Amino acid sequence: MTTIADRLANAHQRIAQAAQNSSRNSNEIKLLAVSKTKPNTQIIAAYEAGQRLFGENYVQEGESKIIALKPNYPDIEWHFIGPLQSNKSRTIAEHFDWMHTLNREKLAKRLNEQRPAHLKPLNVCIQVNISEEETKSGIHPDEVHALAAIIESLPRLRLRGLMTIPTATDDVALQHKELDKMQQVYQTLKQDYPTLDTLSMGMSNDLEVAIAAGSTMVRIGSAIFGEREYTHNQAV
């Protein structure tokens, strides 16, 4: 039976091979294990195999996991990677280390106000709708600089980079086109904010293309934990 440790090792191998194919150093690329809908036992299994970065999509589920695991696993770095309603921002500000899906000024200001003073500033990525699909979250690439300027003015937030979810497709050429465009947006923003270090893009099914396009953080769930396990009343 394949274990989580085996699948985690395989994911690292895929990242290393993709980096080599793109003449990149695999140390430049972080693996974010997407643990949404998975029990704490599986998170612990991944932790014991060396994983420290975990991503959650649902506010209440993520909060309960953090509260349960923090006492014994204080070095886990918790990333929120799902859509967020403004009225649930306090939980993210108080419990998470990273927020990948920041896409509006109102939310940025709420997170800044609600981030406790005793915690380090909340690391944030601006979510960009690089495919410009109407049903997808994220801002238009042309709006990135304006939101970045607002975030930079907020002392309890730290702008780390950009995040995107490209079109869900088997068309590799389209994936390349969108992710290469995302890299251009990132490099343009980095000219004004040279401390940026994170381009969060790539998942289980497209991490190779994402790494070729310059991703520094890939979000892998099913390839590590198996398919998602939804309940009929999944907390959001």
Image (cartoon, rainbow, N blue to C red):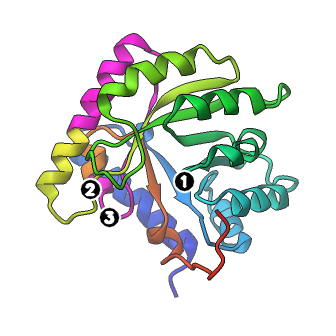
The mark nearer the N terminus, 3 or 2, is 2
Residues 121 and 77: in front is 121
Say which element carries label 3.
loop
* Quadrant that contains the C terminus: bottom right
Question: Mark 1 highlights which residue?
Answer: 82
Q: Position of residue 127 (x, y in %)?
A: 44, 40
User: Which amino acid, mark 2?
Assistant: Thr
Q: How would you rate the neighbour count of disc 2 (Cα within 10 Å): few for under 14, some for 14-19, many for 20 or more?
A: some
Residue at the limit of the structure toward the bottom, as seen here: 1
Q: CA distance from mark 1 to mark 3?
A: 18 Å
Type of amino acid at the residue the image marks with label 3 = Asn
State the image coordinates of residue 161 (x, y, percent, origin top left). 46, 30
Horizontally, residue 19 falls left or right of residue 203, namely left
Instruction: Tell whether position 186 is magenta.
Output: yes
**Residue displayed at 56% across by 33% down:** 124
Q: Is residue 22 visible?
A: no
Mark sitting earlier along the chain (1/3): 1
Specify the amino acid type for callout 1. Answer: Gly
**Which residues make up the magenta segment?**
181-208
* Neighbourhood count class around disc 3 (C-alpha, 10 Å): few under 14, some 14–19, many 20 upward: some
Q: Residue at x 32, y 35 (%)?
A: 140
* Badge 1 or badge 2: first in the primary sequence: 1
* Pointer 3 residue: 205
Q: Is residue 225 left or right of residue 22?
A: right
